[in-house]
Amino acid sequence: MTARGSSESRAVAIAVVSTFVVLAAIVVVVTQSPGWDEFKAYFLNWGYYSDSFEEIARAFLVNVKIFLVVEAIVLVTALLMAILRSLPGPVFFPIRALAVVYVDFFRGVPTILVILMLGQGIPALQLSWLPTDQIFWASVALVLVYTAYVSEVYRAGIESVHPSQEAAARSLGLTRTQALRHVVVPQAVRRVIPPLLNDFIGLQKDTALVSVLGIVEVLRQTQIDQAATFNGTYYLVAATLFVLITIPLARFTDWLVARDRRRQQAGRLA
Amino acid sequence: MRKLLVTSLLLAAAAALAVAATATGARTAPAAKAAIPGCAPDSLNLVEDGVLTIGADNPAFPPWFGGAEKTKPWKVSDPYSGKGYESAVAYAIASQLGFTKSQVKWTVVPFNNSFRPGDKPFDFYVTQVSFSPERAKAVDFSMSYYFVNQAVVGRKGTPIAKVRSIGGLKKYKLGAQVGTTSYQYINRWIRPSSKPLVYDTNDAAVQALKNGQIDGIVVDLPTAFYVTAVQVDDGVIVGKLPTKGTKERFGLVLEKGNSLRRCVNRAIARLWANGTIKKLQNTYLAKAGAPDLK
């Protein structure tokens, strides 16, 4: 016990010292660089930071609204896409093939291009019954792209559920749909929660891309302020806001993973 | 006040010219046009010795840049043509400083990179950058080579085309390019009820106007003429926006503290004084008037 305690405290001491050394080295290299004063004036201006925070935070609300709506939709559409792609038998071949084409296309094309193509292209068709609103089309583009990403996550989850699970369900008299709904999907979803949240963090950051359609969200507001003062501190404000919202989500994911592991291990012991 | 300054600078320059002429009279200097004392090309603080490197954004749009696409990688127009207002003014400045046309090099610099910290890849940057005291904390501006008004462009037959006052613009959806004083004008003086849209480029704003996603765009007046003449078939200049606050003016952007500014300013002062700038404005920017918005 004592031996263990002393080795633990030694490990802590080593961690503290090495962290300190690394940080000190970084600080020295950065602050001794020839352009440090210029860098400081351009990126670390406290006056600009505090003056602009509220305005940039308000622009960030646009991003928050977009990703909340898109996340909710993608949770459903991606699961449907994954199920379509997992449909068995030759009858469903065309549906599977279409799903594959869809996923390949929207995973392959850069998100910013999809946003531009939909946001500029569809209104250019001049169809009066279609909306022309930029936020609408930007959200549609993000739904299309992230449905492709997230459906692959779901599919991995579905395939990781052992076939015996479905076989058992079917032998109990459940239909294929019932087996999927009550046996396979619940297990699959639970397994893929960490990568799912990972994709959603990606989505949150990708909302900055909608600025290409002229929407004044956090990135565009940052650029506006930067161009007005020729100062880059606003980037730091935007970065702060993104980190403030993604760190809690990342910790939440860690906690979910840890809880899952605990439960599995507990199950094994029992 | 400006006129007085220009005249006195001119007198000083003329006197110095006389002295310099006697001093170097014996030698045949290739850069004999370097008429500004202390501003001979080899004495200037330049990115590349003996070459005046000028930054501009690509594509180079009329009426600021003219000529057909010729030199790579320039698009739409060619700054090397010497045609278009900013290209012509830049070559006139170069000539004042004693550079021949072949000693001028143009380099592509996106607007956002023109003011980022660190060494600049250009001696000066010219792409319709408006002076502001805030911006002047980060870079140096030359004296103005153009005083500018903003204007609203809409489409013929749409309600915005009938608007005659700033107040009348309030209810419309407007767009502008990011980082421009056009956008600042919308936000500060028009204050529309629906949020303005802000695009990466003027082209993207023009596309949104064509698509009917916005009712009007705000650009500087010379650009408005170009947009309505070339880019939007049914485009119309709704009107010229009145000056608010101080008169908006374009200046060349130089690295903070670059000693070149003194010489560039003298060259521009001369171009104002000898009528070159007025003449180039008449050539490239004079167009039929636009209605004034009250």
Image (cartoon, coloured by chain):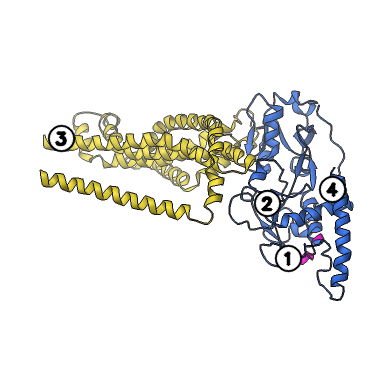
Chain colours: A yellow, B blue
Cα–Cα gap, marks 2 and 1:
28 Å
Left or right: A81, with B101 as reference point:
left
Query: Is residue B65 shown above or below A146?
Result: below
The amino acid on which the numbered mark 2 sits, given as a three-letter code, is Asp
Query: Is residue A24 shown above or below A92?
Result: below
The residue that disc 2 covers is: B57
**Which of the pair A5/B155 is nearer the observer?**
A5
Disc 3 chain ID: A
Which of the two labelled residues, at mark 4 and mark 2, occupies the earlier sequence position? 4
The amino acid on which the numbered mark 3 sits, given as a three-letter code, is Gly
The amino acid on which the numbered mark 4 sits, given as a three-letter code, is Leu
Between marks 3 and 4 in the image, the one whose residue lies nearer the viewer: 4
Instruction: Write the start and end of the magenta stretch as one range.
Output: B96-103
Q: Quadrant of the N terminus of chain B?
A: top right
Question: How would you rate the neighbour count of disc 1 (Cα within 10 Å): few for under 14, some for 14-19, many for 20 or more?
Answer: few
The amino acid on which the numbered mark 1 sits, given as a three-letter code, is Ser
Marking on residue A267: 3
Cα–Cα gap, marks 3 and 2:
64 Å
Q: Quadrant of the C terminus of chain B?
A: top right
Residue A264's spot in the image, x, y percent? 19, 37
Q: Is residue B97 magenta?
A: yes
Which of the two labelled residues, at mark 2 and mark 1, occupies the earlier sequence position? 1
Seen at 88% across and 60% down, the residue is B15
Asked whether the beta carbons under mark 2 and mark 1 sit within 8 Å of each other, the answer is: no
Cα–Cα gap, marks 3 and 4:
88 Å
Question: How would you rate the neighbour count of disc 2 (Cα within 10 Å): few for under 14, some for 14-19, many for 20 or more?
Answer: many
Residue B135's spot in the image, x, y percent? 66, 43
Cα–Cα gap, marks 1 and 4:
24 Å
